Image (cartoon, coloured by chain):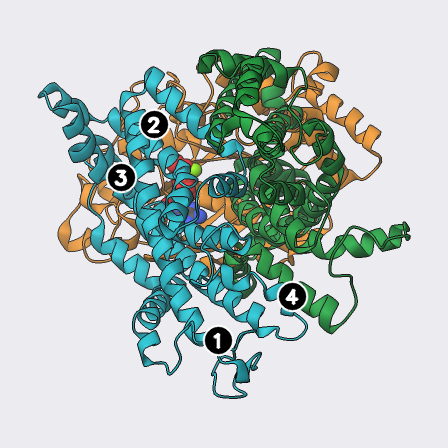
Chain colours: A orange, B green, C cyan
Amino acid sequence: MSALLDVEDLAVRFRSDSGEVTALEGVSFSVAAGETLAIVGESSSGKSVSALAIMRLLPPAPACRVTGRIRFQGRDGPISLLDLPERAMVAVRGGEIAMIFQEPMTSLNPVHMIGRQIAEAVLAHEGGGKTAALRRAIELLDLVGIPDAARRAESYPHQLSGGMRQRAMIAMALASRPKLLIADEPTTALDVTVQAQILDLLRRLQAETGLAIIFITHNLGVVAEIADRTLVMYSGQVVEEAPTASLLAAPLMPYTRGLLNSVPRLEAALRPGQRLPAIAGNVPDPRHRPAACTFQPRCDWAQPDICGVTRPGMERVAEAHLVRCARWREIAV
Amino acid sequence: MARYLLSRIGQSLFLLLIVSIIGFALLHLTPGGPLSQFALTPGMTAADLHRIAHEMGLDQPLPIQYLVWLWHLLQGDWGRSYRDQEPVLAIIGEHLPATLELMASSTILAVIIGTWVGVLSAMRRYSVADYLATIGAMVALSIPTFWFGLVVIYIFSVSLEWLPSGGIATIGNGSVLDLARHLILPCVVLALVTVATWSRYMRSATLDVAAQDYVRTARAKGLRPGQILRQHILRNAMLPMITLAGLQLPTLLGGALVAETVFTWPGMGRLFLDSLGYRDYPVVMGLLMVSAILTLIGNLAADILYVVFDPRVRLA
Amino acid sequence: MSGVGTSQMEMAAGKPVRQGNRAVRRFLRHRLAIIGLLIILFLVLACAIGPSLLPYNQLHIDLRHRFQAPFMGPHILGSDQLGRDLLARLLMAGRISLTVGFVAMVLSTAVGVIIGLASGFYGGRIGGALMRLVDAVLCFPSIFLLLTLAALTTPSLLTITVIIALTAWMQVARIVDGQVRALRERDYMIAAEALGASDSRLMFRELLPNIVAPIVVSATLNVANAILMEAYVSYLGYGIQPPTPSWGNMLNNAQEYLTTAPWLALLPGAVITLAVSSFNFVGDGLRDALDPHMDLPG
Ligand SMILES: Nc1ncnc2c1ncn2[C@@H]1O[C@H](COP(=O)(O)OP(=O)(O)OP(=O)(O)O)[C@@H](O)[C@H]1O
Ligand SMILES: [Mg+2]
């Protein structure tokens, strides 16, 4: 079966006053229908940029260049997202691929009622009249577990709690039954109990609708709970990709091991907003990335004569397990 | 919300008090003070003046005089014109509508053009059009309004003979068309400064809003660009503009004075200059107070409008 | 991103970092501001030495060449209803108008800085009262105030300048007040206070040097505003009195001659616009150069 989404050799470059920044390079991965793929990595490793590149929501051409290939199994057959004219892309956004964000407060327009904001998405993709769209918005609010949905539809964002807002965002994302939902740290800003409720909701929706999810997070506890497969990103590249269980049981990239070591107990959820405890050292400045392995300066396993010379490629170590490390064989034993 | 509005009304009243003190101080700076209107009357002796001064309470201490003056002011007794002994408030009332007509029409014109230019500038940031709009606005703010008036009169009245060079209507012709023809030039001249200011603020408000997360959400849910602009960007960018509109009122009134002078428009501005020429201080002071009060009312109205349009304040 | 973050942190921790060099470079990048600066220099030089190079005195009446159009006779830029040389008058008027602009700027900035410093430094009742005063004065359209004050005094160069300054100090006061309130809570201020520095030392030695940038910007814009205000009052007859020419009063009678001698109206206004927009462009460039949060195209 061919994948729902197939990203190949994706690269993103930003140009600014101070020069060019390569935010992403050589990123390849795929997502199957109904699957959940987690993307983890430290801050500014390129997780959000990957998501925005798929949605084509990055700034336009001179300021930002996106290259590579992104194929998507649309309702009317396969499409190549990066080649799609903007008019057609508008229909894909929210229609076939939906996205929700970290800050449900700032992600909702403060001056419009929740119901109206959801109805807008319904209207954009399903057509029909305003009243019908509003009715559907209330159904959606109900679906995502907002009590008293009809009344809540007439609330403004600031009148809802953080969890409710994120539910409203999810309702908006579901407006036209997308096949893929990209969730960029949807629970980071919420407290633990609410976080668990949102994860439950996503799992339930996935079971009911066969939605595929790309779940971006810092929280490895969340990864263990929700993801079928996990992608580890570091400094603009994918460094390890594996089924979640084997990644957590036998990580091969030293960076992944560092991430795991710094989580005391997997099932213990991190406090809301808490970042992954740091691995010694810093992510390299994207403008001056080492030409060789980008993790080498921080790596306990680094061997200057190997790791400091060439940048390793992605290697397949098991059926669905890929890693970018010259020394994975030694690490594996 | 009611609390907020009450406190704003309180603040405005307090400001009005300070404004009235400034007005009173200016009145007493006039040569001869409030008494001067009688000093000009023929046959007036020093003894008469003394008696009048006593009757008017001018021999009282200043704070008492101020309170009395304020009391009269509050009762609508703003004094009488030196020129024709008409009550000041009645004279101002006669001239107010023409000024309001001019200000309202030019504001509407300026807001439409300014919004359009500002949004276009923001959407095409750093384009040639954006630079031209920036330079144009800066130059527009540097042009003396009266000179701009002369230039348009020269072009449209003297050279092309399309439009009248002044007045509010042709005598004996009250048609709407005639009124409109008289309104065009002063309206455009007065709108110049407002367009420039409005377009600059609109540009930066649009840029601010366009960078907000909820605009990204709107794009992510597949709205078309026009829809995003109208429903999300403009709707929010208008909020700071409401406040700006209130703050611009004194500038607008000042501009109206100049435009009315150039175009012999029978409004408050002309009245002000005429009264200055006749040293008709009661009218001058009355106009000063009215302009300050209009400003205060405008700012208060802007605050109320803001509350209406921003649910965060309304429902807080 | 990280660059902005650290510099903000440095600024929060201690005295604001000096950004002199970068500011100069940014200003130079601002082409319009440079052009504005050059125009100002040119106008100042022309008004200073130009009149002595011209064959005509600005008051010289030449009845044989009345209403001479520009470039059509002995008067380069034409002549007025009395045959006076327009160029000579423009240059002499420029001396007056530019002087009024500069001096009024100095006065209004000084008043604004002192009131703003006092209000921001003492805060509380005093600060509140001073800022309410600013709000109240701002309720009056400045032209109304200006004309009233001008009508109450005998017009002279000095009174006009002072009156213009009196109606233009409020913005500076507001800006200084806001900056001082923000700076006052910084560590180094608290430290200086703990060391027993006097109020005036704190205000003028510690606070003032740190808010020079916004003051310079608004002072520059104030010159533009003062020139414009002088033009308005003089045009309306309450400013500089003839026969002394000023850019504003040269337009006094121009409206009458609009049909016969339009250059009498067009030229002085164009010069005012040129001068005022030059100052505005310089002010704008300075603001961009001195404001660390601005963005310039690449
Ligand atoms: N609009 C932009 N212009 C310039 N650089 C950008 C832009 N957006 C992102 N970047 C850069 O791209 C890199 C990747 O950023 P990204 O937002 O994808 O990180 P992230 O992994 O999502 O981090 P976080 O966990 O903090 O959300 C960073 O170095 C960032 O500075
Ligand atoms: Mg991110």
* Element marked by disc 1: loop
Image coordinates for residue A269, horizontal then vertical, percent: 39, 18
- The residue that disc 4 covers is C256
Disc ID at residue A275: 2
Q: Tell me which label, 3 or 1, sits earlier in the chain.
A: 1
Density class for disc 1 (Cα within 10 Å; few <14, some 14-19, many ≥20) is: many
| Nearest the eye: B180 or A22 | B180
Q: Position of residue C77 (x, y in %)?
A: 49, 79
Q: Residues within 10 Å of mark 4 (few under 14, many from 20)?
A: few
Residue type at numbered disc 4: Glu
Which is more foreground, mark 4 or mark 3?
A: 4
Residue A121's place in the image compared with B293, above or below, is below
**What amino acid type is highlighted by mark number 3?**
Ile
Closer to us: B199 or A112: B199
Amino acid type assigned to the residue bearing label 2 in the image: Arg
Give the Cα separation between the discs numbered 2 and 1.
Answer: 79 Å
Work out whether residue A297 can be spotted: yes
Q: What label does residue C84 carry, if any?
A: 1
Marks 3 and 1 share the same chain:
yes
Q: Amino acid at mark 1?
A: Arg
Label 3, on which residue? C211
